Image (spheres, grey):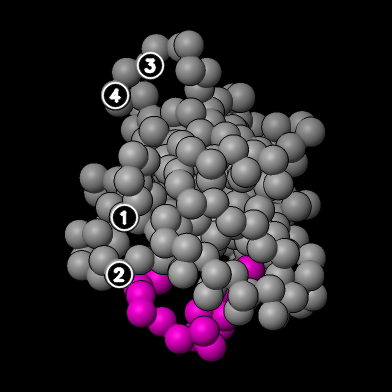
Amino acid sequence: MDNKNYRILLVDDEPDILEFVGYNLRKEGFQVFVASNGMDAVTIAEDVIPHLILLDVMMPEMDGLKTCKEIRKHKNLKNTLVAFLTARGEDYSQIAGFDAGGDDYITKPITPKVLLSRVKALLKRANTVISEHAAGQHPGSGLTIDKERYLVSINGVEINLPKKEFELLELLCSRPQKVFTRNEIFASVWDDNIIVGDRTIDVYIRKLREKIGDNFIKTVKGVGYKFMN
């Protein structure tokens, strides 16, 4: 793992945190970008397309949760990992972070050594997911996605899916184990100008399960769905 190939965006309204965490990340060779508020974070993220965003929760004007939701609206940032770095360690705060589209939740205070370990683990996981799924293959599941033909095969058996069902499955498969909220799914699969009912996603999930089996897609009650690899 060559750290210099990875871009990390650090977002915090406390200059001391930006300086301290940024210094330790740069010392390890990472490319580090910083933002002191949510609006700037979204702008910088669109510009540099970071591999990982370390995002504070408690910020004025636009907090970390709102910032994460805004970031998840941009398709070019769909592979960017978001890890909340915050002093709020309560269960409900962590749940809110995951609901907003976060991939991890790191509680402060944290030593530089432990933080770097968490960062490297996240980037390694992201790199593995991207490399394994670039060809549409999902090792261990027997499932392969052919993006050009809109075709899915399970253990060699081909399954034709309508366009929306295929796009929904492709989205879930793009980040195995990540819980996609309903809003994220709507934004990625359906055009913002198209009005769909609250039960639309449930209907499409049911259709997918009928065709590919019940074991691939798990419902996370009150939040959304995730692909089980």
For the point 61% across and 24% down, which residue is it? 163
Contact, mark 4 vs mark 2 (Cβ under 8 Å): no
Name the residue beneath numbered marker 1. Answer: 58
Density class for disc 1 (Cα within 10 Å; few <14, some 14-19, many ≥20) is some
- 121 vs 64: above or below: below
In the image, 12: left or right of 100? right
Q: Which of marks 4 and 1 is nearer the N terminus?
A: 1
Q: For residue 169, what is the image quadrant? A: top right
- Of labels 2 and 3, earlier in sequence is 2
Q: Which of 176 and 28 is in front in this view?
A: 28
* Viewer-side label of 2, 3: 2
Viewer-proximal residue among 155 and 187: 187
Residue 94's place in the image compared with 153, above or below, is below
Residue bearing mark 2: 87
Disc 1 + disc 3, Cβ < 8 Å: no
Which amino acid lies under the numbered mark 3 shown in the image of this protein? Val
Q: Mark 4 points at which residue?
A: 198
Q: Which residue is denoted by mark 3 in the rendering? A: 196
Q: How far apart are marks 4 and 1 (CA)?
A: 31 Å
**In this view of the protein, can residue 211 be seen by the observer?**
no
The reply to whether the magenta stretch includes residue 31 is no
Count of marks overlaid on the render? 4
- Stretch of the chain drawn in magenta: 105-123
Residue at position x 40%, y 71% in the image? 106
Q: What residue type is labelled 2?
A: Ala
Does label 4 or label 2 sit earlier along the sequence? 2
Give coordinates of residue 81: x percent, y percent: 56, 57
Query: Between tags 4 and 1, which lies in front?
Result: 1
Tell me whether circle 1 and circle 2 mark residues in contact (CB < 8 Å): yes
Distance of label 4 from label 3 (alpha carbons): 7 Å
